[in-house]
Structure formats: C-alpha cells, structure tokens
Amino acid sequence: MIVEAEGLTKRYGATTVLDGVDLRVERGTVVALLGPNGAGKTTTVRILTTLTRPSAGTARVAGHDVVREPAKVRATISLTGQFAAVDEQQTGRENLVVIGRLMHLGPAAGRRAADLLDRFDLVDAADRRVKTYSGGMRRRLDLAMSLVSNPEVIFLDEPTTGLDPVSRSTVWDAVKDLVTSGTTVVLTTQYLEEADRLADHVALLHRGRVAVQGTTDEVKSRVGGHRLTLGFTAEPDAARAAELLSAQQVDGPLTLGLPSDGTAAHQHHVLDTLRAAGVPVATVGSHRPTLDDVFLAFTGGATR
Amino acid sequence: MTAAHTGFANALSDHLTLIGRCVRLTRRNTETLVMSIALPLLMMLLFVYVFGGAITTGTAYLDYVVPGIVLLCTGYGAASTAMAVTNDMTTGMIDRLRTLPVRGSAVLTGHVAASVVRNAASTTIVVSAAVALGFRPSATVVEWLLVAGLLLLYVLALSWLAAGLGVIAKSVESASALTFVMLFLPYLSSAFVPTHTMPAFLGSISEHQPITPVIETVRALLTGTPVGDNGLLAVLWCTGLLAASVAFATWLFRRRAAA
C-alpha cells in the first residue's frame, strides 16, 4: 500500500471536518475520493500531502509518516490543487524551470522543462506568459509542474472543476498517460463520470467519513447503469410504489428513484407493475446516475 | 561533500531560485512598477513646486524634502511586498511550493529580496531626479554609503513587516489596506515639515515614531549637519523592527501554513 490512512480526524474548534477517514491505495492505481462540497475531500488530501496536521489518526505515504517525516513524504509526492498554481507573469517554461531548480535538478531543469512542454502539448506556447493561456492550457501546465520531480504519488484536487468539456477531456487524457507510466494517482472529484473514466477504486466521502470503498465496477453495479425517476401526484401512491418496487425517495415524498439497465423493457416492466397494482404515475424519466443517486444507494440519504 | 555542505548549497540555490522568480514577477508587473517609481516622483514635484513655497524649513525646501520622499518611496515599494505574498498565499502557489522539499520561509525571503532590488532601483531614480531638479547634497562617499546602509536596513525591516501582513491578509485587496500605515507614517514625521510646526501632541508623536530619526539621520548625512543621537536611534529602531518583523512573519507563515 503506497497510501495508508487510519482514523484521520480533523477538527477546527467545534466543527469536525473529518471523522475517522480510513483509506488504502495500492501502488500504480488511481483512486478517486468522491463526494459533494464539504465532505472532507480537500482536507484529506491536505493531510496526506503534509499541508495540514490531523487532529487524530495516522497516515503513511510511500512508507513515511506524514506528521513525523514530512520532508521524506514531500520528496515522493506532488500536489495539484483546486486552482491552477502557476505564475501568470512567467512563461510556461520559466514556471517549469523554477520548480526543477527547487527540486535540485541543476542544469537538467531546462531539459526536464522541455520534455514536459512537449508531453503536455505546450511547445508552441512555451515562451509566452501564462496570462495569455486558456483555462485548459493552464491546467496542463499545472499538471506538468506536478511531474517535474517524477513523483511516486500524485494528488489531484478537483482537477477539472470549472473547465469546459474540451479542456476536461485533455486533462483526462493527461491523467490516463500518467497511469500508464506507473504513477499512483489520488484524485478528488464531485463528478461520478470523472471517477468512472479515470479511477480503479472509488472512496465515497460522506460527512467526514468514507461511506464506501470499492472498485468502480462494484460501485456502479450497486447504483445501476441508469436511474429511473418516477413522479406521483399523491403521497399514498408514492408510498405504495416505493413498497412495490423497493425504490427510494428523491427530493421529497412525491418522487422516487430506482436503478435500471436503461432498456425500454425495464421501463415497461416497472410501469406494468404499477398499473397492475392500480397506482397512477404522473411522470417517468431515465438518466445516468448522478452523485446524489450514488449516495442514495449507499447511505440511504441524499447528499444534503 | 558533507551533508551539511549539501544542505547549505541546496538552501542557497533554493533562495536564489525564489529570488529570481520574485524579481522576474516584479519586473513584469508593470502597473506596480510604474506606480512605485511614478508616485514618489510626482510627490516630489508636488511638494517642491506646489507646497514647498509655503513651507519654511530654514533651508532650501528641495534639500529638506528629498530624504522624506526617499522614505515615502521605500515605504510604498515595501508595501507592495504584502500584495505579492498574499497573491502566493491565496492562489495555491504556496501549497505547491510547500509540498516541495524547500524550506517554507525561503518563499518570504524571495519576496523580501525582490523588494530590496525594486527599492534600490526606484530610490536611485528618485535621487537622480532630485539632483536634476537642483538637489546638491554635500555628502562624502562614506556618508553616501552610510545613507545606503541605513536605507537598506529600513527597507528590509519594512519589507519583512509587509511580508508578515501579506501572510495574514485573506485577499490582495486587504493586503493593500493593511499596509496603509506604512504609507501614512512618513506624513506624520519630520519628512515634509519640521515637527515643531505641528500641534504639540502630534509633534510629540512625530518626534518619537521610528521614521523621524531615520529621516533626520539621512538628512544630516546628506546635508553635512551633525547626526547626533538620531543615528543610533535610527539603527536601533530599524534593527528592532527588522528582528520583530522576521520573527512575526516566519511565525505567522508556519502557523497559517500548518492550519
């Protein structure tokens, strides 16, 4: 296990942000910490990257304790935070060379910068100031800066939040490249789709705890590939339908959600069951599972 | 090479890299750069040609006011350190730098060193402009060096103070607000008018605040009048402020960073 955390707790005064997070990450895999805002994703990453001290619990990264041996941990990791940490008034190349020098690469810092600019498709923009870069280019440079040191574990905190769809997929490609080169990646995200695309394992954070941890497939099969949403006009109808279909309430007593395979046959089956029981349905919708659906399936409560 | 040796070489190279970064950022931040040179120049013209005629100091007003303008200029230059530090603290750059095997406070040292470089440049420009306007200091080479040394100490102290304020500030705007005292203090000193012309209570504040002995020392050294106690007072104020500011800034930095 390259990352091992046990009982991580973080309190700020009377507020408990983390309430005993356990996490195990195997070398060479991608783990997604999935959860809504305020679930404790960023705090977990800050503890694992030595930026914040836990109030209780222990964590080891690449065999080093994050509290007792922060310097050794720092030598093996890199962090890409929520906001692209790049100097606007420096060129892409200068940004990379500064990091290379701080990693004590010496004269090799220049060569390393050139390699990374090439790898992240930034050669044309290399000697332009970063303030002229698009959001996606900044994020790519940000990732490149994380790789200067050849880290064993890369932490990515919400790598695609706020990016347009095109930039998002370039970032995804960059992360997939990392994985093929054997790097371990721990990323946080609010998007199930992102976890699905990139991660081998998913840890669902809910109110400062890991609600569930498993492979992406395990999580998906529990939630279902699709979701059906049924709307009712009267509460007794909804209650009756919930019983018949073992469906759960979503957004109040008049709406139910249940897993589906996305086929017309399944929709027919559901509607036929309700008609046979004499339960009137107002609306039917089918969609890909959202984070809310995942939480519903695992915790029996919505994210809020 | 011993381990201590490598450690020292690495620390030195970290500092040089970060100083290089900050100097580059300053040089390219055109607005701040233009302001930190244009503002003192305009202030000098304003005081000499607009207010100067109405102020009686016993000497040519230009000779009286130049040291004050120089200190105003360094105060302004040092204050922008706070904004640069806050910018790093709030953009995530600080987390990136802190997860590197680099001593955290080297980040602050980089900004302070850049501030010294920036102030050396702007002070040279202001003094040259003053000479062009007819400022004729009688200082010897040794006296010029003493002036440079004292100003360096003063800039270091103010820059470290500003760096500390930059660590506290939650946004670049509030960093700029926190440093207003630095810009304001020179007005309440003997920089522009002799303190005895102020109301008694303001006069005594002005007499006993740190900037007055610094200004009086610089003025005495440049115009060849006796320095008196002011020299020692100025050095004590500056070293005291420097020591306190370095301790304050590095302590705040560790505390804020570890939260």
Image (spheres, rainbow, N blue to C red):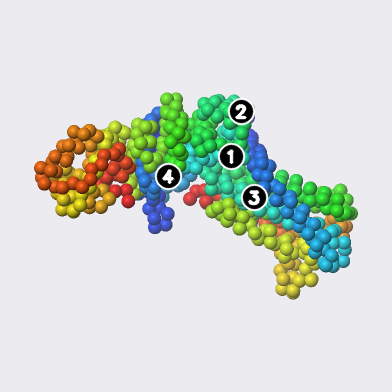
Instruction: Please give left or right for residue A110 compared with residue A153 in the image.
Output: right
How would you rate the neighbour count of disc 4 (Cα within 10 Å): few for under 14, some for 14-19, many for 20 or more?
many
- Identify which amino acid the numbered label 3 is placed on: Thr
Label 4 sits on a secondary structure element that is helix
Q: Nearer the viewer, mark 3 or mark 1?
A: 1
Residue at point 16% right, 43% down? A245
Specify which label sits upstream in the sequence, 1 or 2.
Answer: 2
- The answer to whether the residues at label 4 and label 2 have Cβ atoms under 8 Å apart is no
Residue position for label 3: B81
Q: Which residue is mark 1?
A: A131
Disc 4 and disc 2: Cα gap in Å? Answer: 32 Å
Q: Chain of mark 4?
A: A
Circle on res. A42: 4
Label 1's element?
A: helix
Residue found at x 18% / y 33%? A265
Chain of the residue where label 2 is placed in the rendered structure: A
Q: Quadrant of the N terminus of chain B?
A: top right
- For the point 20% across and 49% down, the residue is A232
Separation of marks 4 and 1 at Cα, in angstroms: 26 Å
Is A211 or B234 nearer to us in this picture?
A211
Residue bearing the label numbered 2? A110
Q: Is residue B13 above or below residue B85?
A: above
Coordinates of residue A218 in the picture (x, y in percent): 27, 34
